[in-house]
Image (cartoon, helix red, strand yellow):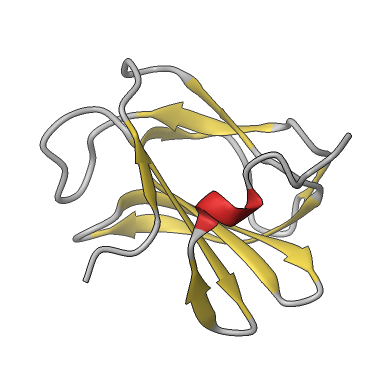
Amino acid sequence: PHAGLDFAVPAGTPIKTPAAGKVILTGNYFFNGNTVFVDHGQGFISMFCHMSKIDVKVGQQLARGTVVGKVGSTGRATGPHMHWNISLNDARVDPAIFIGAFQP
């Protein structure tokens, strides 16, 4: 099943992390294309997929709002969009419940 949210935006749009965290993994995967995983602590991990460009490195500490890459259509994608997935303690959860929850 499709887990996460898709945001249809123009290719090249900057992708910003919604909360501070640490980059724990980056790579190019068959389904997800160029992907960045950010550990926000307390069991929360964000996954940003289908990126045209990855602008961060594994181990990098990120402040809220840091650009992690650019929107693209890599992997199994039919057009440019950002796929955002959140895991909480290794269980996928709906990112929609967190929109607006990350306060500056």
Q: Residue at x 81, y 48 (%)?
A: 20
Asked if 102 appears above or below 32 in the picture, the reply is above
- On the image, the x and y values in percent for residue 64 come to 80, 38
Q: Residue at x 69, y 69 (%)?
A: 44
Q: Quadrant of the C terminus?
A: top right
Q: Is residue 80 left or right of residue 4?
A: left
Q: Residue at x 35, y 21 (%)?
A: 9
State which quadrant residue 3 falls in: bottom left
Query: Between 6 and 80, which is closer to the camera in this rendering?
Result: 6
Q: Is residue 45 left or right of residue 83?
A: right
- On the image, the x and y values in percent for residue 68 come to 60, 36
Q: How many marks?
A: 0
Q: Residue at x 39, y 17 (%)?
A: 12
- On the image, the x and y values in percent for residue 77 come to 16, 43
Asked if 42 appears above or below 18 in the picture, the reply is below
Q: Quadrant of the N terminus?
A: bottom left
Asked if 1 appears above or below 103 in the picture, the reply is below
- On the image, the x and y values in percent for residue 99 come to 62, 43
Asked if 103 appears above or below 12 in the picture, the reply is below
Q: Is residue 73 left or right of residue 71?
A: left
